[in-house]
Image (tube, rainbow, N blue to C red):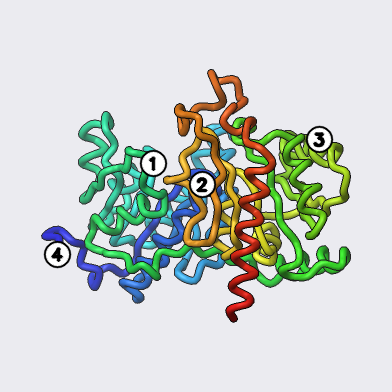
């Protein structure tokens, strides 16, 4: 038992701060679930960027959501001050007893000092100095060997304050909602598709150096289309849409293309109904895992030990380049990752067939 464990019975409200990208926020969702499981009377709020809020909206452990606007920094000084003040006043009014800060983002230190929470926990960040270290009552070491999954690294914040997560408590949670489920069902029905009859492929990422080639994506789609309908998605970003257009132009079949047509909640509803997900290391891959959909994940510069699909049947396809995972934005900063571009279609197709075989075997045993 930790001598400085946080007395959970004395905590009424907690704030979990995760100011990063969509996938990072989803990978933080187990923190809310574990905290609620160990202290069910605590009200748990979250602070995230406004565009990532859908990742936690509807989470059963969440009481309130607070957001930082991504575009506040582009506003006039007076407008930004007003936005920041509204946020701070809303946070201050909640009177938090515990603040759980999950990143190295500087805002967490200011909040820990100014909100008056009796307990606060954050990662120990080398080089941040005394201001950072003295801002929090508890610090936990960052996992830096590249072999600790990001979910476990996030849960280290709770371990540091005396909470030991149970194995069945560490699941990600994402709630699509009835409206998203209804729209996706209608889109699929128009194509004669129902749950479990299609393979979902999301080939794009906001970072092109994480993407497989258009030619090989097209070849995989053609192979899979011989026995399954393929649904192709991407974010409404122009570069992602251009990648999908290039892929479709090289296919000899007709996948259902929903690129740029789905909101995040709808993407979750779509991937929840897929028989299988195929994609690169990106938010949709984590979303598929959260929805319990088996996944084939292609990895290049990023490390699969940290970022692989969490708690779901999956296959990782990666090259044997001795330099990976390097964490670079392409070889030599070129935005092209050879460890990805050299992955063969046979490798990926075999991984898909392996997961499909597991599903058929499980169905037979039932």
Please identify, in this view, whether the residue under mark 1 or under mark 3 is nearer the observer.
3
> Which residue is labeled 1 in the image?
107
Up-down relation of residue 94 to residue 109 (above or below) = below
Where does the image place residue 5, in percent across and percent down from the top left?
18, 61
Report how far apart the C-alphas of labels 3 and 2 lie in the structure.
Answer: 35 Å
Residue for point 60% across, 30% down: 209
Residue for point 78% across, 41% down: 218
Quarter containing the N terminus: bottom left
Closer to the chain start, of discs 1 and 3, is 1
Closer to the chain start, of discs 3 and 2, is 2
Q: Secondary structure at mark 1?
A: helix
Up-down relation of residue 221 to residue 249 (above or below) = below
> Which residue is labeled 2 in the image?
68
Closer to the chain start, of discs 4 and 1, is 4
Residue for point 65% across, 69% down: 360
Report how far apart the C-alphas of labels 4 and 1 lie in the structure.
Answer: 31 Å
Where does the image place residue 164, in percent across and percent down from the top left?
27, 64
Return the mark for residue 1.
4
Q: Secondary structure at mark 4?
A: loop
> Which residue is labeled 3 in the image?
246
Quarter containing the C terminus: bottom right
Is 253 on the left or on the right of 265, as rendered?
right
Return the mark for residue 311.
none
Q: Secondary structure at mark 3?
A: helix
């Amino acid at each position: 038992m930790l001598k400085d464990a946080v007395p959970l019975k004395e905590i009424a409200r907690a704030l979990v701060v995760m100011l990063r990208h969509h996938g990072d926020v989803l990978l933080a969702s187990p923190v809310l679930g574990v905290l609620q499981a160990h202290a069910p009377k605590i009200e748990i709020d979250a602070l995230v960027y406004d565009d990532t809020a859908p990742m936690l909206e509807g989470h059963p452990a969440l009481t309130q959501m607070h957001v930082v606007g991504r575009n506040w920094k582009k506003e006039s000084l007076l407008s930004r001050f007003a936005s920041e003040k509204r946020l701070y006043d809303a946070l201050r009014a909640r009177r938090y007893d515990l603040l759980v800060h999950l990143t190295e983002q500087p805002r967490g230190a200011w909040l820990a000092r100014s909100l008056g929470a009796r307990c606060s926990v954050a990662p120990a960040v080398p080089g941040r100095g005394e201001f950072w270290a003295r801002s929090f009552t508890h610090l936990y070491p960052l996992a830096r060997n590249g072999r600790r999954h990001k979910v476990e690294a996030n849960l280290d914040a709770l371990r540091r304050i005396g909470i030991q997560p149970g194995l069945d408590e560490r699941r990600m949670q994402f709630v699509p909602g009835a409206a998203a489920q209804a729209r996706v069902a209608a889109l699929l029905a128009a194509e004669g598709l129902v749950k479990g009859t299609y393979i979902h492929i999301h080939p794009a990422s906001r970072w092109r150096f994480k993407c497989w080639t258009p030619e090989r994506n097209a070849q995989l789609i053609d192979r899979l289309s011989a026995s399954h309908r393929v649904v192709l998605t991407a974010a409404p970003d122009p570069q992602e849409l251009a990648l999908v257009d290039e892929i479709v132009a090289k296919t000899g079949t007709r996948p259902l293309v929903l690129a740029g047509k789905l909101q995040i909640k709808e993407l979750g509803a779509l991937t929840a109904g897929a028989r299988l997900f195929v994609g690169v290391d990106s938010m949709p891959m984590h979303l598929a895992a959260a929805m319990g959909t088996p996944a084939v994940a292609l990895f290049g510069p990023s490390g699969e030990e940290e970022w692989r699909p969490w708690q779901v049947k999956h296959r990782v396809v990666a090259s044997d380049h001795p330099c990976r995972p390097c964490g670079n934005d392409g070889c030599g900063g070129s935005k092209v990752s050879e460890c990805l571009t050299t992955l063969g279609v046979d490798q990926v197709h075999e991984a898909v067939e392996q997961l499909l075989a597991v599903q058929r075997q499980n169905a037979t045993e039932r």
